[in-house]
Amino acid sequence: MKPQRILIMGLPGSGKTYFAERLQKQLQQHGKRVGWLNADDVRKLHNDWDFSDEGRIRQSERMRRLADAAADVVDVMICDFVAPTQQIRNIFDAHWVVWVDTLDESRFADTNKIFVPPSHYDFRITEQNADLWVPYVATRIIADQRRPQFNWKKETVQMLGRWQPWHQGHRALFERALAKTGQVCIMVRHCEGWQDSNPFSIDRVVNNIRRDLDPLYQGMYDVIAVPNIVHITYGRKVGYTIEQEHFDEETESISGTKIREQMSLK
């Protein structure tokens, strides 16, 4: 039987190699026979430093071939390489795709130009923190547990707010909302600078939310930007309810205003 192929992909400098090394050790601790193919090592072995489209395709074919050839000695083969296009990812045909999405761009302009973010992946790593992410990814792989996929047709709970900043009270509200239908749409009001009390850009707010909710809740929520909504109105029999949640005194006392004031003192 051919080994399971795990693709660790992402822009150069995103932390793929370090993540792959730690993931190999974590899976081995669970009794798996795990190999690891690093793209630079494979290119060096074959003296092939061609980064044209043809060269990248050849590299993907080579990585898959080497992974499959190790069937007698490993159960799992980790392969870390950029895999910048869907064609290259299709050629490799990974059993698991880990997208290390920690950079907006790399130092290589040619790679940045052709890199297409994947639409299908099993894990999206949003920060260079292997100690947080590797145990989560390893546990899911061992259990053969695919991450949920956000379903736009499924019944969903909406959370609308400024989230300036996102804090543990919001996290508690999210977890209660998630328990209702299994997925949540978090709407971020576009209100940077509004009333002189909303200092954070919408990108920063979204990143803060994702940093807190991942890795546990990937695929169970989506974050979208909306206008600075200040009033919600509806007609009768609209098919949804508006509900206020109540928490313990400690949770309800968490104040975004106080947090912003504390942040300004640092």
Image (tube, rainbow, N blue to C red):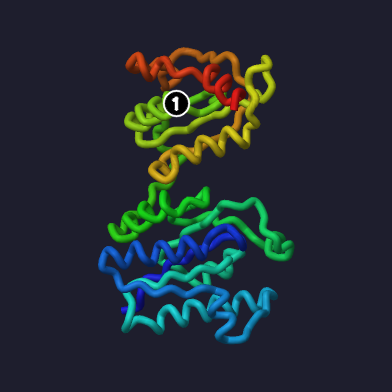
Residue 214, compared with residue 79, is above or below; it is: above
Q: Residues within 10 Å of mark 1 (few under 14, many from 20)?
A: some
Q: Along the horizontal axis of the image, is 102 left or right of 30?
A: right
Residue 183 image position (x, y, % from top left): 40, 36
Estimate the x, y position of residue 232 in percent, counting from the top left. 54, 15
105 vs 184, left or right, is right
Q: Is residue 43 left or right of residue 156?
A: right
The residue at 54%/80% (across/down) is 42
Image x and y of residue 213, in percent: 44, 38
Most foreground residue, 26 or 76? 26
Residue at (65% x, 51% y) in the render: 104
The amino acid type, in three-letter code, at marker 1 is: His
The residue at the point 52 percent across, 49 percent down is 127
Residue extending farthest right = 109
The image quadrant that residue 165 belongs to is top right
Pick out the residue farthest to the front: 266
Residue under numbered circle 1: 170
Label 1 SS = helix
